[in-house]
Amino acid sequence: MGLKIGELKSGNFDIDKPVLLYDSENHKIFWVGSSENHIFRCNAYLVVSEKGNVLIDPGGVLHFNQVKKRVTEVLGDPSKVTHIVSHHQDPDVSSSIPMWFKINPDVTLITTPRTKVLLPYFGFDREKVKWLDVSPLDDTILDLGNGNGLLFLTSPFLHFPDAFVTYDIGAKVLFSSDIFAAIQPKWQLVVTDMERHKKDMMYFHVYYMASQKALKYFVDKVKPFPIDAIVPQHGSIIPKEYVEEAFGFLANLRCGIDLLTKESPVKSVMDELFGDI
Ligand SMILES: [Fe+2]
Ligand SMILES: [Fe+2]
């Protein structure tokens, strides 16, 4: 019962199957992402509960068949997905959404107002969709029954202006989308070497995230929540023992417009934080 992430550090699981991350009565979380061997590997997650089955950042068209296969293994039938969370409209996060609507047109799509404007350009009729709008007041909750629920928190300019993240209240898991993402030549499901992982996160954030100010604003917002794992859309899951370190690292990381110099953003941050590459 509870969080399985510690047990998954060994890598002793079948990556071609859904991977159980959290297990309690009427509430489970599975990794259902892509096993493609790529530095920009995409994670997707499925929250299974009494009141609904929520697919988080379903992924791109390229990975639809893989994600669908894993979801089907968990639910028996992919049409049992009741909600899709789209944290922003990037193709690697959301371009498969029309394919999910073909499986179940009744799926509720959860996103922010500005993401809602853009998602239909992947090819679906905005008028036919059930939407759940994420409020900028950070008070939108999807009730999962038995005291469980998903709370949606905006993450301005990380990296889309109206991006957001999802906090699983019962499991104490933060689905962080591109925030805390990493570019990893050698992917593993769970971080075991945080020093290495900081560098992998840095490669991603210096280019994609708006500024250190935006990162600090976000970290200050989520820090008060008890968080047992950060599960991003790229790279490894950050287990509880590294959560505080990850917060400290991102809150102080210069990135995006902080690095508008002729020098490479990677080089300027590397020299500052890690010494020579
Ligand atoms: Fe993105
Ligand atoms: Fe992404």
Image (tube, rainbow, N blue to C red):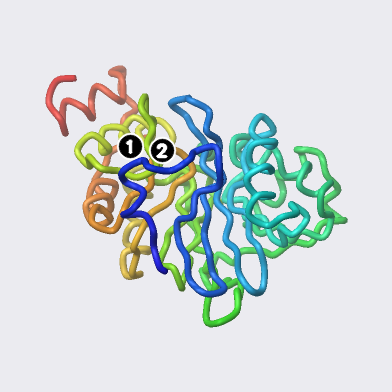
Q: Residue at x 31, y 46 (%)?
A: 9
Q: Quadrant of residue 130?
A: bottom right
CB-based contact (under 8 Å), mark 2 and mark 1:
yes
In the rendered image, which quarter contains the N terminus? bottom left
Query: Whole-percent x and y of residue 175?
Result: 47, 55
Query: Whole-percent x and y of residue 68?
Result: 69, 43
Q: Residue at x 36, y 54 (%)?
A: 5
In the rendered image, which quarter contains the C terminus? top left
Question: Which amino acid lies under the numbered mark 1 shown in the image of this protein?
Answer: Met
Query: Does the Cβ of the disc 1 residue fall within 8 Å of ligand 2?
Result: no
User: Where 221 falls versus 69 (above or below)?
Assistant: below
- Seen from this angle, which residue lies furthest left? 275
Residue linked to disc 1: 201
Left or right: residue 105 compared with residue 7: right
Question: Which amino acid lies under the numbered mark 2 shown in the image of this protein?
Answer: Gly
User: Where 267 falls versus 132 (above or below)?
Assistant: above
Could you give the CA–CA distance between mark 2 and mark 1, rounded to whole angstroms?
8 Å
Query: Does the Cβ of the disc 2 residue fall within 8 Å of ligand 2?
Result: no
Q: Quadrant of residue 34?
A: top right
Query: Whole-percent x and y of residue 128?
Result: 87, 56
User: Where 182 falls versus 80 (above or below)?
Assistant: above
Q: Residue at x 23, y 56 (%)?
A: 241
Query: Whole-percent x and y of residue 102?
Result: 84, 46
Which of the pair 198/264 is nearer the observer?
198
Is label 1 in a helix, a strand or a loop?
helix
Residue linked to disc 2: 235
